[in-house]
Amino acid sequence: MSSRILLQINSLKASGNFNMKKANLASSCFVRMHGSKL
């Protein structure tokens, strides 16, 4: 792999971790709101 691709993957991982945290928060809030229906 070229270093440029590795840099892109690392930045994707960093933003992905942030997005995962936001998604986890959103999904837990969703489950709390709609838990009785699921």
Image (cartoon, grey):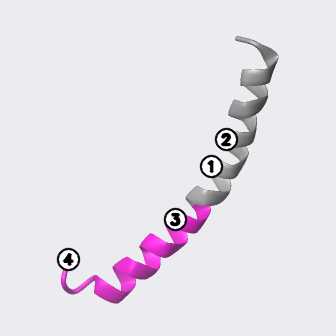
The answer to which image quadrant residue 21 occupies is bottom right
Q: Amino acid at mark 4?
A: Leu
Quarter the N terminus occupies = top right
- On residue 38, which mark appears? 4
The relative height of residue 5 versus residue 22 in the rendered view (above or below) is above
Residue picked out by circle 3 = 23
Residue type (three-letter) at the residue carrying disc 1:
Gly
Residue at disc 4, secondary structure = loop
The mark that comes first in sequence, 3 or 1, is 1
Numbered tag placed on residue 13 in the rendering: 2
Q: Which residues are magenta?
A: 21-38
Dot 1 falls on a residue whose secondary structure is helix
Crowd tier of the residue under label 3, counting other residues whose Cα lies within 10 Å: few below 14, some 14–19, many 20 or above: few
Determine which residue is flagged by label 1.
16
Magenta-colored stretch includes residue 33 = yes
- State the residue lying farthest toward the left: 37
Image location (x, y in percent) of residue 8: 73, 32
How far apart marks 3 and 4 lie (CA) works out to 18 Å
Q: Cα distance, mark 2 to mark 3? A: 15 Å
Q: Are marks 1 and 2 in contact (CB under 8 Å)?
A: yes
- Mark whose residue sits in front, 3 or 4: 3
Compute the Cα span from label 3 to label 1.
Answer: 10 Å
Please report the residue visible at 81 percent of the width from the left and 17 percent of the height from the top. Answer: 3
- Label 4 or label 1, whichever comes before in sequence order: 1
Q: Residue at x 72, y 23 (%)?
A: 5
Q: Secondary structure at mark 3?
A: helix
